[in-house]
Amino acid sequence: MSPSQETLPFGLILPPTQDQLPCDDGVPMETQRHKLQMDILIDQLIPWLETREDGYVGGNMFLYFSLAQVRNQDFKGPDFFAVLGVPKKERKSWVVWEEGKAPDVVIELLSDSTAQRDKTDKKLIYQNQVRVPEYFWFDPFNPDNWAGFTLKNGIYEPIIVDEQGRLLSQQLGLSLLRWSGVYKTVETVWLRWATPEGEILPTPDELSAQTAEEAQLQAEQAQRQAEQAQRQAEASQLQAEEAQRQAEEAQQRSQELEALLNRYRQQFGELPESSSDHF
C-alpha cells in the first residue's frame, strides 16, 4: 500500500488517486508524424470545447480503469481520448473511479509495432473493461487503414463510412475525415475532426490565422472604401470647380452683353419696342 493512500475504518483502503499513480513511463511517441497526428486531433477540440461548459480532451496519457491494472503496472493509455460531461481542469492521468466515467471516444494511432495489439487486445479492453462508447483507429502512414466502432449491447459494431467518406461520432456530434494538407510543416493525409456538415474544425493556430486574414481583408476593404471616398470627394471638388468656372463665365458674358447694350443705347438710343406690342 502506498503511504499516501487513505485507510478507512475496518481496514478499508481507498483506491489511489491520480496524484498517487504513475503518469509517465518515459517512453516517447514512435514518430514525429504520430506525435503531430495526436496534436492535431487534440488542438482541434480545444476551441470547440471552449464553447461548452464541460469536457476534457487528452492524449498519450495513462488511463486507469481497474485496480488489477494498477497491480499489473499496465499503465499504457490511448493516443487520443475525449470526455464530455466532466469539469474542465488539468489532469495528470485519467482515473475512471475518480472521474466517475470512462472516455466517450478513444482513438489509437497504428504503427507496425502496435497495430496488432490496437486491433485486438486494446479493442477488447476498451469494449469489455473500460466500456468506451466509441473506438477508432488510424494509421498515419497508411490513411486507408482506419476504422470506427460503436458499443451496442456490450459489443463493438463497425461504424460505416458515409457517402462523404466520414466516420460519424454520435458521442461528440462530430465526424472524422481524412484531410490532405500541411500541419506544422508536414504535408500528408491527416485524420481531422469536422462538423456533421463537413466543415473542418480549426486548430487554435488556424483560428488565429483565419482571424488575422479576416482582419487583413477588412483592413483592405476599409482602405478601398477610403480610396473610393477620396476619389468621390475629388470628383465632387472637380464638379464644384467646374460649376464655379461656368458660373463665372456666365457672369462675364452677362457683363459683356450689358456693356454692349449700354454702348448701343448711347449711340442709337433705346431699343424699339417689339412690333407685336401694336396689335
Image: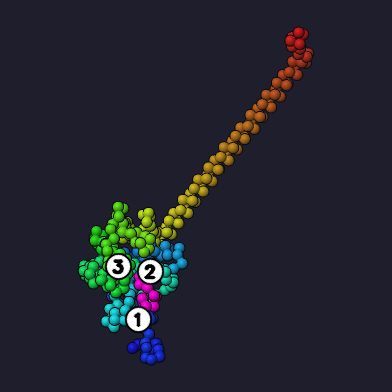
Q: Nearer the viewer, residue 119 or 38?
A: 119
Residue 140 in sight: no
Which label's residue is closer to the chain start, 1 or 2? 1
Density class for disc 2 (Cα within 10 Å; few <14, some 14-19, many ≥20) is some
Left or right, residue 142 beside residue 103: left
What label does residue 83 carry, if any? Answer: 2
The CA distance from mark 1 to mark 2 is: 20 Å
Assign a secondary structure to mark 1: loop
Assign a secondary structure to mark 2: strand
The CA distance from mark 2 to mark 3 is: 21 Å
Q: State which quarter of the image contains the C terminus.
A: top right
Residue at the extreme top of the image, as rendered: 279
| Residue 117 among those drawn in magenta | no
Q: Which residue is mark 3?
A: 153
The CA distance from mark 3 to mark 1 is: 32 Å
Q: Amino acid at mark 2?
A: Val
Q: Which residue is mark 1?
A: 21
